[in-house]
Every structure is written in C-alpha cells, then in structure tokens.
Amino acid sequence: MPEFLGIDTSNYTTSAAVYISEENKIYQSKRLLPVGKGKLGLRQSDAVFHHTKQLPEMIEKLFGENILKKPCAVTASSRPRNSEGSYMPCFLCGEGVARSLGSIEKIPIYTASHQTGHILAALYSAGRLDLVSHRFIAFHVSGGTTDCLLCEPDKENILSISEIGTSLDLKAGQAVDRVGMMLGLDFPCGRQLEALASGADKKINVKAVLKGNDCCLSGLENKCCAMADAGEKSENIAAYCLDTIAETILAMTENAVRCYGTLPLVFAGGVMSDIYIREKITARFKNAYFAAPEFSCDNAAGIAIFGYIKYIGEK
C-alpha cells in the first residue's frame, strides 16, 4: 500500500507521521520541545538542538511501534508560511532529515509550509480532504499566527493560499500564553486557561478590534493585566481572554464571508482546539469544520498528506 512520510519541526513540537493513502489512515509520533518552568517559549538555537535530538527518536518510535513499509515519498515542512521570506531555522532540522532519507532511498522529496500542513491536517480530521479541489476560507490560529486565508486549488490541484487578514501585533496563541503565565499557569497554557475559564462567575463585555480585515490583540493582554491588578478573579480573566479571541475570529470570519461569499470554513491551529472558542464559532457558522485536538496542535499529518497529493499529481 502506498505510504507517505511527513516530518514537521515547528517551534514547539517534533513530529513525524505516515499517511497510508489506500486506508486514509494516519500514524504519527510527536513530542513537545522542553521549555523551562517559568519560560515563555524557546530561542531558535535551543529549538534546533532539541529537534536534532528528538527527531530520530520520533521516527524510530513511529516505525518501531507500527507495521509500516518503505514510504513512496518523504515531505518536510520547510517554512512557516507560503510567502516570500518566510523562514525559521528550526525547520532546517526536518528538511535535512527528509533530504537525506529521500536521497538514500531514491524516493521523491517534497517540502511544504507548516501552515499548509495545519490546513490539510484539519481537512483530514474533519473528513473533508475533498475541499482541496474547491475554494474555501481557512483560519490558522496558533502561537505564531492569527491568519484568515483564502484557499483554492492551483494548477497542480494543491492548495494555493492567499492572506485575507492577519493580526497586526500579538498573535492569539501568544495572548493565551502571556495571560496564562501572568495567572501562574505553565507554558504552553492553552488547556489550563480553558479549564480556568470554565469557573468564571461573571460575563465581561468584549469587543473585537479590527482594522480592515486585520485584527489587533495587544489590547487584550493590557486589559487582562489591568484586571489582575484590580483584583479580578483569575477565572474571569481567563474567560475574558478566550471570549475576546473568539469574538475577534468571528469578526474576521464575517468580513471574509462578506468579501468572498458563503464558502466552507476550516479552522486549524492549536488555539482552535479550545472548546470554549469552538462552541462560540459553531453557534454562529454552521458550515465550520474543525480538527480534532490531536490534529489541531502542531503535527506532521498534513505534511504527509501533502506528499501524497503532490505524488499522485505527478503520476
């Protein structure tokens, strides 16, 4: 059976995955990069070191714990986005391993953006891989992005991605982690902040700040700090943070729909695994598709699927 290996070395997760196309099945192995207690993220040099150490272990685990054949192709994420100048050193780790393996095994070597991988993983998880042949609106919301995107097939029937709107300052995932750490949570803070917000005992009015199709989130962090200084309960601050992010994404979605019409909506990235935010979006938009949590956070599943789409397109 045709099998396709994907490798993703993002800023906080080392991941390898195999996509078995005839079964439409994903096997994956991944591990967060270690971040010291009280630290808000990693330097790129530290991320590169940890990926170099962890990636062989993830591939060994993937092929050691599952009955998998030699892949038909190997694909690595090589850049954050599909845009000129998009670059992070940590992606060199996965790309280097993919190029080495492909050369030794004489199999095709492909590269894709980390963002493309997120979108394809969300489509796979939602059972809508068919959308790669259609036009749709996608959101990639994580620690490094708060992007609203127009996706459509290119001449090779692979995703062409163009930006509709983005955050002009703080990204949603950054806001979650900064507010979470201010409240004494451990990095990464998403799951803990969501749990904390479930204990909120009052509703605080929120307002999305948009400039055209773009958003601004730095005021969210400032407001949360002011609430903490005023003695507001941590649970209410957590709920305010997530409410603001949800309302911001809803406002950006409404703008995109006004511009491009009623298209399928796909939500990808670690922040979109938050049930608190997800429920607010699905209440307003019935044509919204989300990835399961294991395919929302950083993973190599979509990268492996990209390799499959690229491979069959060349046949």
Image (cartoon, grey):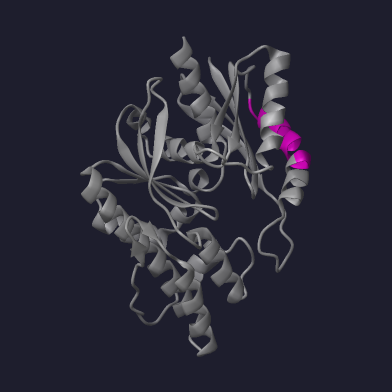
Residue 180 lies in the magenta-colored region: no
Instruction: Tally the numbered discs.
Output: 0
Q: Which residues fall within the magenta stretch?
A: 52-66
* Image point (48%, 84%), residue name: 227
Asked whether 293 or 189 is in front, the reply is 189
Where on the picture, by quarter, is residue 167? bottom left
Residue 234 against residue 1 in the figure, above or below:
below
Extreme residue toward the bottom, this view: 230
Extreme residue toward the top, this view: 315
Residue 151 against residue 277 in the figure, above or below:
above
- The location of residue 127, given as percent across then percent down, is 37, 35
* Image point (44%, 16%), residue name: 313
Residue 89 against residue 60 in the figure, above or below:
below
- The location of residue 37, given as percent across then percent down, is 72, 66
Tell me if residue 180 can be seen. Answer: yes
Residue 237 against residue 35 in the figure, above or below:
below
* Image point (26%, 58%), residue name: 283
Residue 54 lies in the magenta-colored region: yes
Magenta stretch: dominant secondary structure: helix
Tell me if residue 64 can be seen. Answer: no
- The location of residue 150, given as percent across then percent down, is 35, 40
* Image point (64%, 46%), residue name: 13
